[in-house]
Amino acid sequence: MVLVVLLVVGAVVALVLQSDRDTKAEAKRRSIAVAQTFAHSPGVQAALKTADPSKVLQPLTEAGRKSAGIDFIVVMDTKGIRYTHPLPDRIGKRFVGTIEPSLAGKVYTESVHGPLGHEVQATVPINSTDGKVIALVSAGMKVKNVTSEVTRQLPIILAAGASALVVSTGGTALVSRRLRRQTHSLAPDEMTRMYEHHDAVLHSVREGVLIVSDDGRLLLANDEARRLLELSPDAEGRHVGEVSGLDPETVDLLVSGREATDEVHIAGERLLAVNQRPTDRDGGPRGTVVTLRDSTELQELSGRAELARERLKLLYDAGLGIGTTLDVVRTADELAQVAVPRFADFVTVDLADGVLHGDEPTPTATDMRRVTVCGIQDDHPLYEKGRLIDFLPSTPQARGYGTGHSELVTDLSTAMGWQAQDPERARDILAYGIHSLISAPIQDRGVVLGMANFWRTKRHNPFDEEELSLAEELVARAAVSIDNARRYTREHALAVTLQRSLLPRALPEQSALDIGYRYIPAQSGVSGDWFDVIPLPGSRVALVVGDVVGHGLHAAATMGRLRTAVHNFSTLDLPPDELLSHLDDLVGRIDQDESSSAEAAAEIVGATCLYAIYDPVTRRCVMARAGHLAPALVHPDGSVTFPDVPAGPPLGLGGMPFQTAELDLAEGSQLVLYTDGLIEDRARDLDVGMELLHQTLAGHPDRPPEESCQAVVDELLPGRPKDDVALLIARIRALPPNQVADWDVPRDPAAVSEMREAVSGKLEEWGLSELGFAMELVLSELITNAIRYGCEPIHVRLIRDRTLICEVADGSSTSPHLRYAASTDEGGRGLFLVSQMTERWGTRYTPQGKVIWAEQALPEITELLPD
């Protein structure tokens, strides 16, 4: 298209230049002709001889100029002085131009800038009869008049050029469109490359290609098609039916033109997969294209590829299905389930018996426990699951266990060493149809843990070397999981043992509460949950529930330290808020100690705790909590509430005081303490768990604590929990009023004797008069100390419970101390006597002062104690 446009533009330019040249040439010719005609006109020479040639010649030149269509005719003498000019004022002046050639008798044309402007003029001589130049004549035209002629021709030239451009462009577009359609818009280099690729593909592809015309002629056959069909060199161009060597069914297919997909046809000794498609779907010529593949080779390759694919799929499924749990037996079952029936008809797994308990395996294949038996049928004669087997050294299992290498037995009927293990059972196994065995050691870190045995029956061919490698790969994947499960079993057993030893093995005897409890370790291992029931002086009982964040031995050990600390702090008879403050300081020190070690920096302790003290005399419960969940309270009418106990920060944060809450509990109520593992779960929100606990406890006021514990566990924990759970349910008891005696004592030494009489009377009423002497002595000493060193109010309380308890309270916070009195000391022997005559004694502080207490064993309990 660009070339055509350039040609048309060039032609137009050429026409314009040609027209300009022709017009100028015509102007010169006309000027010469007019000048010569006028020079030879009659009367011109006569006029020149007159006295005033201009008078005669001026009219003649003007008339000739106008009739000839030129712009000027100038007659001049031989010196160039004008006789005539279109502009009369120019007559008599010198001619503008060159006259020398004309004086020499020549005709001379030139372009000058004269009086009329840019002019084209011709100058000719006027000769006398004797041939002498007597004058000159110049005729010419203004250039702009010549150019105007060209300008008048220019529209015609441009119109003709535009028409030519339109016609040629349209023709070029039609030709280009046809070429693009024929070449699919490919450039020449692209067409060259396409044909080169076309030839390369046809000659190098490993698939036969035929192109057959609509009338059944073979138009093209590539090298592979010639090889597969054994075509002659002159086959192309001939009718398909005339080509020798083709099967009749193949000829019918090629002539029919119908579509075919992977139809199998015979070509000599080959089976060809034939595909045929029409070629006119996209507007191409009618005909068909045929592809041929040698299926005899493909079937063999396909079989190998399918076998490799199945083995890869088996290994992939083994990677996903083996080792889903940290259980040794379950992992062995998963290995067997993956292999049956895709690899073996039966699979048995024998592990060293110690492995099941987390121990290291034995060096020989003795004491092997069969942990898995899996097969296509259940009536097999193989050793049953759970059997303890001692393999003989001649068996494949013993050899593989000792060497760490797999054993392949392609024919069990000839394996005498295997049959020697149990000849009778071996005959049954062979009669059952089992004929081949692979025994692969289960080993990790160079230690053999057991043997995996793969058995095949007559339904399959015997195992081969390739399948031996596959079996080793399967067992290797299971071995890592089995060893991990073994080590986890060992560590879990150690952790559980440690945690069980740290938790209370039995609840202490006390009369204030009826206790039920549950402790359920987490599925993934031990944790730091704990509970405790601690008897306190005055028949009181402390209830503790706590939770150390994390799992494993570190959490269990930390829990033991905290539980021991609670026991130690409880011996000081501290109120709950003070005890939690001391416990908070302890956890902070533990964190500081562990954070100083780079190895333990990641195991900073975090813990929660709830501590409650119940007094059966007053039925008052005082409790405080550090980041722990609030307890539940089941009232005697069956309703359930969650008391508002101020929530303190978790232990270890420090800096924040703890607050206590006091509850007056009705006899028969149940106080429910628990850890977060009971109600929190990934599958439900905390509010849902609290509501489930509420529903489970409500409506059962008379249910014993043990039954309540079981009901709560069944409802909230249907399976093994993912976090430890500690649950403690305490039914409230109250001491009857007839087992408690109270007296207010004035600060007067005379009151001591009165209190001795009152106490003696109460002991006689309780049938404990034999304890009167000792109790009177103890009471006298404690009241005397209160009167002498304490301050009012002074109060005495006597409690008959499992022991006889005497309490003397006063308003002073000073505490007496036991010491050895010298022989010269007048005092200091009272508390020594108290300690000698009582089972226990001590001091506890109250908001109003202090209480000094002492306990004596009751006679019936004393008789039961060993000497």
Image: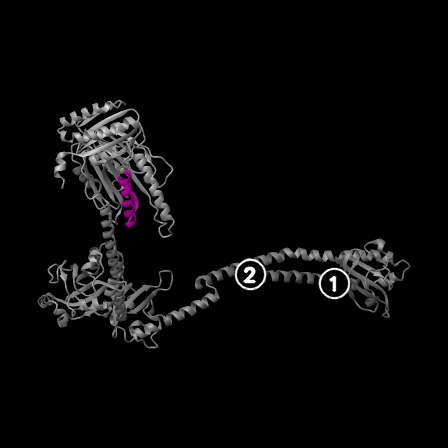
Residue 493: which disc? none
Compared to residue 762, the image places residue 392 above or below, namely below
The residue furthest left is 424
Give the side of residue 413 with respect to residue 318, left or right.
left
Compared to residue 651, the image places residue 393 above or below, namely below
- Secondary element at image label 2: helix
555 in the magenta segment? yes
Magenta part of the protein: which range?
Answer: 545-570
Q: Is residue 331 visible?
A: yes
Compared to residue 63, the image places residue 813 above or below, namely above
- Secondary element at image label 1: helix
- Residue 165 picture quarter: bottom right
x, y percent for residue 287: 34, 65
276, 524: nearer the viewer: 524
Dot 2 corresponds to which residue?
2
x, y percent for residue 249: 25, 69
Between marks 2 and 1, how big is the CA–CA gap?
Answer: 39 Å
Mark nearer the viewer, 2 or 1? 2
Quarter in which the C terminus is drawn: top left
Residue 28: which disc? 1
Q: Residues within 10 Å of mark 1 (few under 14, many from 20)?
A: many
Identify the main secondary structure in magenta: helix
The three-letter amino acid code for the residue at tag 2 is Val
604, 103: nearer the viewer: 604
x, y percent for residue 79: 87, 63
